[in-house]
Amino acid sequence: MGDAGALMELDSLVWDEHSTPAQIEWKSREHYLQKCPPGSQLIAGIGEEICGYLGFDSPTPLESNRHVYDINIAIHPSYQRRGVGRKLMEAVKQHAAGQGIRKLSLRVLASNSEAFAFYQSCGFMEQGRLVEEFYLDGQYVDDILMWCPVEAH
């Protein structure tokens, strides 16, 4: 809970028209904590500085969908391409396996080729594509659905 302010600031730095179809704006710390409650994120830090986070949650309230985590990841621009994201991905896979999760899923804009390549390098595969799903910065952009199996431990 004490990291909420820094995580809100990180969201404002990372999420823009190249990485999300709509700007993320938190009305208040309470609003943030409602949407991202403690225990729903893994946080990477060096000392007191937050370098990034990886959020995870069940995609629906259905019992039949409880074996899946929808994930999202944000790395502070100063710490990108330093292995922080990869460490968070490894950590969420371990956490998920311990929770009986069998599948991780995420969405990425087709225009965000660096993120798409990163996810592939972490073992994610394309499972579907919503063609021309968003109109961003004067062009239609596909929304790519990706998934990765979680190895049981």
Image (cartoon, rainbow, N blue to C red):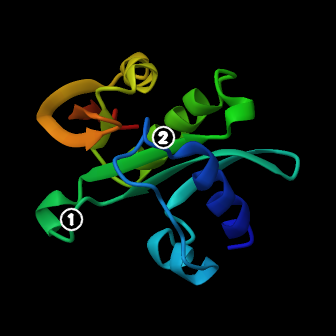
Q: Residue at x 29, y 35 (%)?
A: 138
Which element is circle 2 on? helix
Q: Residue at x 21, y 71 (%)?
A: 61
Give neighbour class at mark 1: few <14, some 14-19, many 20+ (Cα, 10 Å).
few
Q: Do the residues labelled 1 and 2 touch (CB within 8 Å)?
A: no
The correct choice, above or below, for 35 with respect to 20 in the image is: below
Q: What residue type is labelled 1?
A: Thr
Specify the farthest residue to the front: 138
Q: Quadrant of residue 118?
A: top left
Please name the residue shown 76% across and 45% down the image: 45
The spot of residue 59 in percent (x, y) is: 25, 59
Image quadrant in which the N terminus is located:
bottom right
Q: Nearer the viewer, mark 1 or mark 2?
A: 1
Q: Residue under label 2, please give it.
A: 94
Q: In which quarter of the image is the C terminus?
A: top left
Q: Residue 2 carries which label?
A: none
> Dot 2: few (<14), some (14–19), or many (≥20) neighbours within 10 Å?
some
Q: Left of 79 or right of it: where is 35?
A: left
Q: Is residue 93 left or right of residue 13?
A: left
Q: Position of residue 58 (x, y in %)?
A: 29, 60
* Residue furthest to the right: 47
Q: For the residue marked with disc 2, what is the amino acid?
A: Gln
Check the image and name the residue furthest to the bottom.
Answer: 30
CA distance separating discs 1 and 2: 21 Å
Where residue 60 is drawn, which disc sits there?
Answer: 1
Toward which corner of the image does residue 38 lie, by quadrant? bottom right
Is 135 placed left or right of 121 in the picture? left
| The quadrant where residue 108 appears | top left
Q: Which of marks 2 and 1 precedes in the sequence? A: 1
Numbered circles on residues, count: 2
Query: Residue 17: x percent and y percent?
Result: 43, 41
Left or right, residue 57 beside residue 12: left
